[in-house]
Image (cartoon, rainbow, N blue to C red):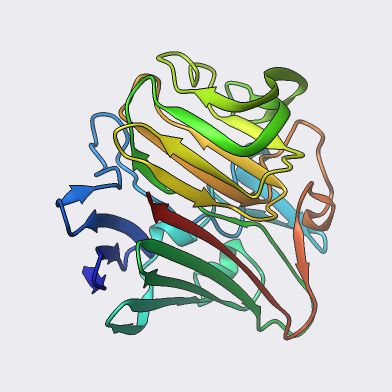
């Protein structure tokens, strides 16, 4: 079911299945900024990535000597969230552990996904609350897809020298890195830039970027350790993905606590991050 929020400038719709952003429309001209999920290209729109990001080796991880099975990008995107609030320009969605999640993920938690419109900006905040009697390990990330065209430009707020990591046919990271830009602000969206899948970037100095084209969106991603940029090759959208986590490589870890970029919460701890999309 879709839930709607709005303010003077924008309307926004969110699907309670996965707490997935469905629509962001500028009222003055009716322009839609979010990819509408054409199943012939990519059915998704803005999945919430939790409690893993990307692919695990054989879809499995271990914790305290027990093996668990977890699909690519985790559980949240396939689960129904509860609506805690939806009024005016703000909506809050909640996902809590249950007997089914505990079979795949042995931690008690609450995940809050908040959407709030502020003038011509959408602020999306994700909050993880540890309700386990002890520590908790997780990854979390966002995956919003914005309408764009081939030839549009992604412009960082300051010059960057960046290499991308790549994944193999099993969606696992390979050791090599490949240059993307050198002392430049701009990545041009070409027909083949995503031919070898996502750009997986780290060490970014900028805190935000702008998608520049017919639709211009300033996207603030903050201090995320990894930023994914992805689309199906040649498709008219681009996903900007702040990640607090990353795919496995082929180095088998005997415990999820040793996974690269894994996040840790002590008992009763909270983790929160936000991204902001500002219509220019």
On screen, residue 24 above or below 201: below
Counting from the top left corner in percent of width and height, residue 7 is at: 26, 73
Residue drawn at x 66%, y 40% is 247
Residue drawn at x 62%, y 64% is 105
Counting from the top left corner in percent of width and height, residue 103 is at: 58, 66
On screen, residue 55 above or below 101: above
Is 74 placed left or right of 235 in the picture? right
The answer to whether residue 42 shows anywhere in this view is yes
Viewport quadrant of the N terminus: bottom left
Q: Quadrant of residue 107?
A: bottom right
Counting from the top left corner in percent of width and height, residue 218 is at: 46, 48
On screen, residue 5 above or below 25: below
Is 15 placed left or right of 102 in the picture? left
User: Which residue is at the front of the view, 77 or 127?
Assistant: 127
How many numbered marks are there?
0
Residue extending furthest toward the top? 192
Residue drawn at x 32%, y 35% is 42
Residue drawn at x 62%, y 50% is 243
User: Which residue is at the front of the view, 209 or 73?
Assistant: 209
Counting from the top left corner in percent of width and height, residue 163 is at: 72, 24
The answer to whether residue 55 shows anywhere in this view is no
Q: Quadrant of residue 11?
A: bottom left
User: Which residue is at the front of the view, 191 or 196?
Assistant: 191
């Amino acid at each position: 079911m879709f839930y709607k929020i709005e303010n003077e400038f924008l309307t926004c719709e969110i699907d309670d299945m996965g707490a997935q952003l469905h629509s962001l429309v500028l009222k003055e001209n009716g322009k839609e900024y979010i990819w509408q999920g054409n199943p012939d290209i990519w059915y998704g729109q803005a999945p919430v990535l939790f409690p893993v990001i990307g692919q695990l080796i054989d879809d499995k991880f271990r914790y305290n000597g027990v093996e668990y099975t977890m699909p690519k990008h985790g559980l949240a995107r396939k689960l129904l969230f509860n609506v805690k609030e939806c009024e005016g320009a703000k909506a809050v969605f909640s996902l809590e552990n249950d007997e089914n999640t505990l079979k795949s993920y042995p931690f008690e938690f609450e995940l809050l996904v908040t959407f709030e419109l502020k003038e011509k900006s959408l602020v999306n905040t994700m909050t993880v609350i540890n309700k386990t009697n002890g520590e908790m390990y997780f990854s979390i990330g966002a995956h919003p897809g914005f309408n764009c065209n081939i030839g549009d430009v992604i412009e960082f707020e300051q010059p960057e020298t960046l290499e991308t990591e790549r994944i193999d046919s099993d969606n696992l990271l390979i050791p090599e890195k490949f240059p993307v830009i050198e002392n430049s602000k701009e990545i041009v969206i070409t027909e083949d830039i995503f031919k070898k899948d996502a750009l997986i970037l780290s060490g970014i100095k900028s805190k935000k970027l702008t998608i520049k084209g017919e639709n211009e969106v300033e996207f603030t991603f903050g201090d995320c350790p990894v930023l994914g940029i992805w689309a199906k090759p040649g498709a008219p959208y681009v996903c900007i993905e702040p990640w607090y986590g990353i795919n496995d490589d082929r180095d088998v870890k005997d415990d999820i606590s040793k996974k690269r970029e894994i996040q840790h919460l002590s008992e009763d701890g909270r983790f929160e991050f936000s991204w902001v999309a500002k219509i220019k």
